[in-house]
Image (tube, rainbow, N blue to C red):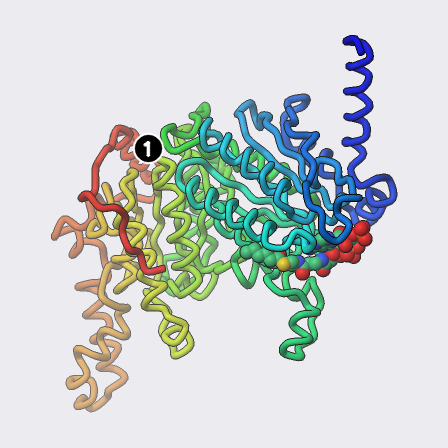
Amino acid sequence: MGLKEKSSDLRRRMRSALKGGGEKAIEKQKAIGKLTARERIITLLDPKTFHEYDLFVEHAAKDFDMDKKYLPGDGVLTGTGTINGHPVCIFAQDFTVAGGSLGWMHAKKITKIMDHALKLKIPLIGINDSGGARIQEGVNSLAGYGEIFFRNTLASGVIPQISVILGPCAGGAVYSPALTDFVFVVDKISKMFITGPEVIKTVIGEEISMEELGGARVHCEITGNAHFYAESEEECFNQIKKLASFIPWNNSQKAARFPKKSPKTRQYKLENIVPDDPKEPYDVRDVIKALCDDSDFLEVQELFAQNIVIGFARIDGHTVGIVANQPLVLAGVLDVDSSDKAARFIRFCDAFSIPLVTLVDLPGYLPGVDQEHAGVIRHGAKILYAYSEATVPKITLILRKAYGGGYIAMCSHHLRADFVFAWPLAEIAVMGPEGAANIIFRKEINSAEKPDEMRKLKVEEYKAKYANPYVAAAFGYIDAVVEPEESRKMLIHALEISNQKNINLPFKKHGVPPF
Ligand code: HXC
């Protein structure tokens, strides 16, 4: 055969491989609103940048008549391309081929592209759509998963890893996404669980639908396993592109700097957002938008543990990670889930050189038997650990309340914030005036002729003395008390001068955080 014939043989082979599981299987997927694996990659990446590898990989399984089955590409596409001009490695499982199930060669394709990502130090994106371990390949499928989990762990903190769940992701398969940095899900399409409804029914007799067990909303609102929720695959890909614009390619680079833009100050006026009364709620996202470039804030885990808000924004063109108490939900308290949510985000930012801006307004940790028994001590400690070990620039702005453990936990100077600013409204104390007066003036209140009046008096006395930022400022725990409208200027300057921050923690193999 000459080159001409060999080229036409190549094209024939390619046509056959590109068919995936065939038209019928593709139609079945389309009917439930799914794109094909190849369409997904092409839609997500910059136009014409997808370069596919290992198209001709085939499985080598023999048992259960597998030797008679041709599985194009062994049910997964792998390759490289760009997003917003930045290189990425990508894989997408093809459900039309044996349900995207993971056999040994399928896993080898994934681990090969993962190795590329780690070697080339570029982000890894995995699109998961699979029935899990390929049952016919037995322990080799489990081995494949193990090899993937190991690499997820090795790559953690070196390159950003993004998981997109666009179909079933069942059994141990869920642990690869769980080890990655960000998990994207789409309504009605994504399903994640360790054991499905049928197994649950057989083993413990409970009946539940797949959607209720592990649908997109469940993982965004209840479990916190997913970070971004979309109504359609297209919306999901746009979210990924946006995230990619905020983060660096790897841990030895900084995120790209963008031209600076002013916040939309007509829409977001700080003096109109935060009420004077420390008990009145407001949406802290409006404060974030009043402070960041173009009022553009990409919220992460928007639907989970909403008493804390985390996400990416830019200040003066630089990406920052924002952590903010949300007075709109549970008065912005810290609890099991919000500590967990914030701690992981702080560690991501620290691993990828993204400065942290913390906005504080909270009454402390949430009291209650439920929280104590759910392990608020252990989970609450995560945020202390994450802030303490973070060596990126850390800038804190206390908006209103900062009471008790909450004051310390929300990146106080004691956890090595580089700068702590406070508004004149700020109250930094062990607890709120009512609680404090009830305890320290108990005798006077109880023995007074009119206890209620005495209580009021003592509360006012306490407020006048301690419910302000000046006691903390007198000890140097606050670097500057600033008017709200000065805040952005202060943040810009603080970020600018901490740009070259480079500190080392004491030598250790690694710490032992409370997880
Ligand atoms: C081999 C599989 C498969 C699997 C699906 N298929 N899952 N083949 N191994 N795990 C095949 C089906 O046989 C079928 O092949 C094709 O994929 C499409 O599957 P359907 O069942 O027709 O699709 P659908 O009705 O949409 O149902 C999708 C599904 C269901 C809900 C995912 O297939 C399912 O429940 N699969 C098993 C899920 C599961 O229990 N996985 C856990 C495995 S154990 P044909 O030839 O008919 O088209 C595991 C442990 C890993 O993952 C541990 C790692 C630590």
Q: Is residue 206 visible?
A: yes
Note whether 408 is above or below 124 in the view shown.
below
- Along the line of sight, the residue nearer the viewer: 431 or 333: 333
- In the visual, does 32 lie left or right of 199? right
Note whether 398 is above or below 489 in the view shown.
below
Question: What residue sits 82% from the left and 23% below the top?
Answer: 12
x, y percent for residue 226:
55, 53
| Image quadrant occupied by the C terminus | bottom left
x, y percent for residue 41:
67, 33
- In the visual, does 188 lie left or right of 333? right
Q: Secondary structure at mark 1?
A: helix
- Along the line of sight, the residue nearer the viewer: 90 or 285: 90
x, y percent for residue 280:
42, 63
Q: Is residue 192 visible?
A: no
- In the visual, does 25 lie left or right of 381? right
Question: What residue sits 23% from the left and 33% below the top?
Answer: 502
User: Which residue is denoted by mark 1 in the rendering?
Assistant: 492
